[in-house]
Image (tube, helix red, strand yellow):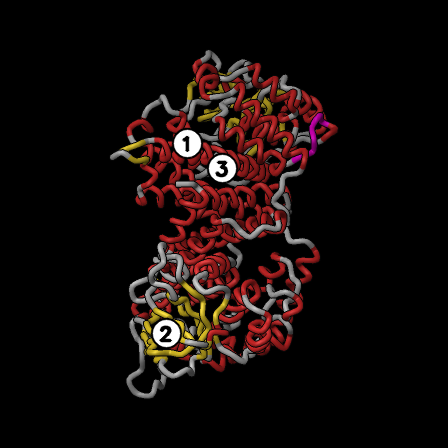
Amino acid sequence: MNFDYSEEQQLLADSIRRFVAKDYDFEARKKIVASKDGASEAVWKTFAEMGLLGIPFAPEHGGFGGGATDLMSAMEAIGEGLVVEPFLATVGLAAQLVARGGSEAQKKALLPAVSEGRLKMAFAHTETGARYDLAHVAATAKKAGSVWVLDGEKRVVLGAPLADKLVVSARTAGKAAEANGISLFLVDRAAAGVNLRPYTTIDEARAADVTLKGVEVGADALVGREGAVLALIEEVVDFATALVCAEAVGAMKQANDATLEYLKTRKQFGVPIGTFQALQHRMVDMVIASEQARSMAYLACARVDGEKDARERARLVSAAKVKVADACRHVSQESIQLHGGMGMTEELKVSHTFRRLTMIAQQFGDAEHHLARFAALDRS
Amino acid sequence: MDLNYSPEELAFRDEVRGWLNANLPDGLRRKVAEYRELTREDLLAWHRILARKGWVAPAWPKEWGGTGWNVVERYLFEEECGYAGTPPLIPFGLSMCAPVLLKFGTEAQKKRFLPRIYNGDDFWCQGYSEPGSGSDLASLKTKAVRQGDHYVVNGQKIWTTLAHYADWIFCLVRTDSGAAKRQEGISFLLFDMKTPGITVRPLVLMDGGHEVNEVFFDDVKVPVENLVFEEGKGWTVAKYLLGHERMNTGRIGASKRELAKLKEFAAEQTQNGRPLVEDVRFRDKLSRVEIEIAALEITNLRFLDRMRRTGQPPGADVSMLKIKGTEIQQALSELMMQAVGPLAQPFKPANGGDGFDFFTAALAPRYCNMRKTTIYAGSNEIQRNIISKMTLGL
């Protein structure tokens, strides 16, 4: 048992934290969010130079052979700085599908490029009506001679407007919501028949709804086994869920730090409002909630890296997400309330943190979804 | 980062678990599992079994019988005891009076009291709270006046846990009522409970149980050699002890045992013809408690890891373990009671008890009793004050 970060993890965390504090402060972030792409190519290059983009890939594919635990402190820094770059979309989701399920040729072609910051990716999976059911895939892929032809509609594809390549889930057999028959395909975002309706999300990232109409890809575009990738998708989504748990811990730290500072400086009735016990106890409960969430983020990251039993891994990731989702709501709502009217304005960072925490609470499944999953996977 | 125990720690845990399984008498195990009242003899029997094994006071220095275990091993031992369902080790002698004597006592006091505490020869209780001073301990009024080689004590203590079993009591008393600050002029005294002038009156709680008492002092003569540390410096001693009291209050092991029991129990109850445990609304509550326990366990381990690394006692933020741990205990007792629905109502048989379901009848009283956990040992509001002041600087 040891809760220390290793020297490498600590160095990486420190360099990202320094970078965020210096070059990704609230003002810099505002400019990036307001820019045409809503993300910064320069920041992405810096991430690549720091080695951040290659952490969870094998050394032979240009990576460092790390896992979620190695990314945890970086995700905290991303959370604290409300970084909107498509890190989770590329490194946490789409490239993970390739790294864990792709062919050697696909890994060689894509992962070094991701690590070096030359290639961004996005995972096109969620569909209308699917909610959090990962098996709900109605998009289709049909074989036509030597090619696959993809048709369907994907919703809220995070990072899609910035991505060079999409990993698209589509049915090669079966009906929507069936576990078997789902396949994954690499699709150029610019390919004929791929249409994007891009937008900014409430938490100020970029995403798009994606329509695929008669999109043709070669046989080598298939990622993983035909019709049998639900387990792979679940594994990768659990990995990404563990990462957003760590990101939430960082964002909650920002909300708590800002709120505590406000309690100490804002005066009413001639005294700092932090002298009022009614507010002190609420602040303490926010801190306890975030500490409990931090414990569960550690657990989730450790288990997606080390738990061989997929069922037990899924159960613990769900346990973590329940706690983190509850804490996200608790901390974000209280941080606004304790800031009073100022917390409602765009001018304070805490209102932006509120938006990210609110979305994390629902990303990859809300507390109720994961509570049900946790209970369903109980063996006792 | 590694959340797993080391092979050595696992081997230690298995050794403790194996020994507990072999040495915890069935009768005691059953009494604890069925929430029955433990007698003085029950408590002392378990104390003496551990004393013979050499495990009754792990945290003490080795020369006085400590085991030399590190903080993680001590934690594992306590959690295994909780998980096995042993009777509790009553803390007043072992982990309250003894640490005070070790830190502040004279050699003569240590030699006189520590071996008897270790062996379970003396049963101790704690005289802190008074009718007018609960959470505000420094307002205490019990008075001790020096007369020759004695103090003469007059006043009253309340919430004195197991005073009716006790041979000795350690008390905070006021030896100087003229002190400038109320924290000054307090002293720490040890009384023999057989001293003339001490009266113990039971305070029966709403579950019908007798745990706590009022203790009255009427011209009680306490020899001066029973003063611990300096006269008027009792607050220093009390503060040292309060730090000790907040340690290891998560009670994860016991809560895990109760959770397993609750799952089993809820599977036997039926609702609309199905096992209650399959009812979504009940199941959600159950799952939430299970997740709370998992989170608290990791948080507890993080504190231990920090202590082991820094060699420092836990900071004020350890109060969160008490807050969350007690909330979990209350939630478990409430779910146990809710699991039996209308059958929670029977309390005491009116004639003999033939066919009376004593276990089910213990669940509502247990729920009633557990309300104490967020009040005692520094109410959860006091714990929040501590974090607010000491950790957050508010």
Measuring from the top left, give residue B126's x and y in whole percent. Answer: 43, 70
**SS at badge 1:** helix
Q: Say if labels 2 and 3 share a chain.
A: no
Q: Say if labels 1 and 2 share a chain.
A: no
The Cα–Cα distance between marks 1 and 3, rounded to whole angstroms, is: 14 Å
Residue at 63 percent of width and 29 percent of height: A12
**Residue indicated by mark 1:** A258
**Residue indicated by mark 3:** A249
Amino acid at the residue labelled 3 = Val
The numbered mark at residue B153 is 2
What stretch of residues is rendered in magenta? A61-66
Measuring from the top left, give residue B350's x and y in whole percent. Answer: 28, 84
A359 in the magenta segment? no
A62 in the magenta segment? yes
Tell us which disc is closer to us: 1 or 3.
Answer: 1
Q: From what the image shows, is residue A27 above or below residue A322?
A: above
